[in-house]
Amino acid sequence: MDPDTNLDTLMARYQAGDFAAATALIERISPQLHRHFLAHFASRADADDLLQETWLRIHRVRHTYRPGEPVLPWFYAIARRVRIDHYRRATRTAAHERSLGQRARVDALSEKEDADQAAEDLETLLAPLPQSQRDLIWMMKVAGMSLEDVARASSCSVGSVKQKVHRAYENLRARMSAMGPKKRSVGGPP
């Protein structure tokens, strides 16, 4: 890969004030981060807002990135914190609205139609897993991150990541076995 297009190099240049490097990073990483947020939220608008918030936060804390370290786990760690903050804020807002007697019914299924069918299928398959296992599988299999990168992004040891992913795979195998061959087939009977 050309050194000018290497994400780590682009981040180091961005830290040094290179506007072109910042633009290149945004163009290269935004689609991945957007898919990451779409997999966790039914609303495309939420995913758009979270992506924007992530880039604002990256800009504010860009001085904390250590050149020479892989930048992708650093991005995903920030995106994870933004998502958690959004969830907490939404939870507090919902609790506040209920306390005021305003019972708002949110129908996430109607907005789910906007998401890609593949992301829906993956999310459905991963839904019974604990959030930490879903995040790890998403980072490893969808974002293509290495074990070491996932460990950095999730603030876990490599061994812990391996253990959680192994447990997640076991859970998925059991779930797919319970579904049987007829329920797993997408196209119907031949």
Image (tube, rainbow, N blue to C red):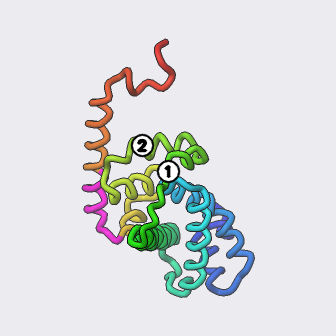
Residue 81 in which image quadrant:
bottom left
Q: What residue appears at the point 48 percent right and 72 percent down from the top-left corner?
A: 82
Q: Is residue 38 magenta?
A: no
- Seen at 56% across and 55% down, the residue is 43
In the image, the segment drawn in magenta is 155-165
> Please, which residue is most extreme toward the right here?
20
Residue depicted at x 73% and y 80%: 19
Q: Is residue 102 left or right of residue 130?
A: right
Query: Residues at badges 2 and 1 in contact (C-beta under 8 Å)?
Result: no
- State the residue position of label 2: 124
Percent position (x, y) of residue 182?
A: 38, 21
Q: Return the residue at label 1.
A: 107
Say the numbered circle drawn on residue 93: none
| Amino acid under disc 2 | Thr
Residue 40 position (above or below residue 170):
below
Q: Residue furthest top?
A: 190
